Image (spheres, rainbow, N blue to C red):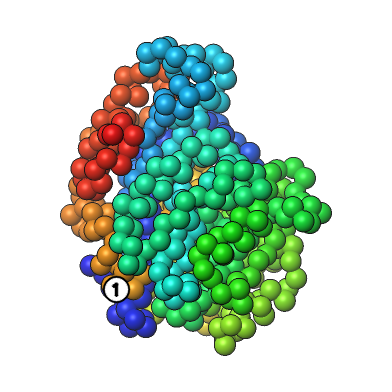
Amino acid sequence: MPMNDTTPRGFQEVNFDGLIGPTHNYAGLSAGNIASLSNAGGISKPKAAALQGLSKMKALMDLGLTQGVLPPQQRPDLAFLRAIGFEGPDAHLLAQANDADPTLLAAVWSASSMWAANAATVSPSPDTADHKVHLTPANLVSNLHRSIEHPTTTRALRMIFKNPDHFTVHDPLPTQARFADEGAANHVRFANTHGEPGIELFVYGVDVHDPSNSARTYPSRQTRAACEAIVRNHKLNASRVVFARQHPDAIDAGVFHNDVIATGNERVFLYHEQAFATSRSMLTDLAAPLGQPLIPIEAHDTDFSLEDAVKSYLFNSQIVTLPDQSMALIAPLESSENPRVSKFIDAMVADTANPVNAVHYLDVRESMRNGGGPACLRLRVPLSDTELGAVHQGVILTDELHAKLVDFVSRSYPDELNQSDLLDPALAQSCIEILDELTQILDLPALYPFQH
């Protein structure tokens, strides 16, 4: 198992990627997500999508990083349709929902849990008062299709991070708009190294006590109240927490989560100048507890526009610390295809003032067409070697597990899906059988409702 033994206390950041589910489709359900909206109704390729995701996981593992796998949700969620009054056998149930409102049908088929950055917010043990890893599953109340994810997400996280000596998996925050929580996509942790106490940046778009400076075109999904609740539940030191507000112009440009406009790793902070509405003193506030300045990499409008940022998803790249302590950017192919963004990346990699000295472009086009880049697909969990040993090992990627998952996806996933396929009860049943086999591969028995 790859380990980074040179970091204090054997710490490393483990990326748990969401395995893309067999119902991956383009329904355009996410207001403010321009890629999702623009590709609505298109023909998706679930098999290609999942294989792209597995290739991404393998690429990071081959760089010497430890990689985990998070399972997809049970979809279609026919129990949800029954809970809102639809009845009858599966074929009738699906047809009823479609006749009443096609978006209801699309919601229960959505494979959006693939974007594991929205699964939870994570605070590692060096940051918490009880020295445990704290995870809060996101309630995702801003979108119907995502709001039905958290029961299974919570169950999966409690199966994977099951040792109470090391992990606390909280209940999601109350499913109410005041506590709307979108998970780690609006959270960045900075530290001198992954194993040292860090400072956690919580980014929000809505503050009930300050309704001014709000986005006008698209909804703001993360609330300050949710961020504050997570800080309390995770037992974080208030002097090592910073709250920042998303710039409303960025949200209206399609920056529906902070990770579409900013990211960080250890002391490196990559962001666009229009990312935040808060004061520029934020950099000082973030750096002060670390005892060293951050290493800012700021993109200006003169480098590329917000529109370029959203189209290329540069900021939805991952910055990772490799075993030799160098850093690399894991970026989508789309970033290399935008000449302004590509030029910025080349300059960043060549600049010795920051430790990012390599870029790896990965093909995750099926995810990108639905509005999620490399960073959307993963949940970052810094772990000590002891904590990693306490994680359920069935989800830690190895060459053998990767080969099993590639074979599994290749023989069982649909090649293509269009919106009319969502009316097919035989497809619904086949997806249940696919997930049943997956729980055997990952050794996660009784994960899904149909297995109870």
Q: In this view, does 95 lie to the left or right of 219?
A: left
Residue 160, image x and y in percent?
A: 31, 55
Vertically, is 323 above or below 28?
Answer: below
Residue 428, image x and y in percent?
A: 35, 24
Query: Which residue is situated farthest in the bottom direction here?
Result: 291
Q: Is residue 77 left or right of residue 138?
A: left
Q: Can residue 357 be seen in this view?
A: no
Q: In this view, does 286 lie to the left or right of 417?
A: right
Quadrant in which the C terminus is drawn: top left
Vertically, is 76 above or below 404?
Answer: above
In which quarter of the view is residue 309 placed? bottom right
Where does label 1 land, which residue?
Answer: 385
Residue 191, image x and y in percent?
A: 50, 77
Q: Residue at x 48, y 74 (%)?
A: 129
Quadrant in which the N terminus is drawn: bottom left
In which quarter of the view is residue 16 placed? bottom left
What's under tag 1, amino acid-wise? Asp
Query: Which residue is situated farthest in the right direction here?
Result: 212
Q: Residue at x 75, y 71 (%)?
A: 279
Q: Which residue is drawn at 52% across and 82% down?
A: 352
Q: How crowded is mark 1: few (under 14 residues within 10 Å), some or many (20 or more)?
A: some
SS under mark 1: helix
- Pick whichever, 188 or 355, lies toward us: 188
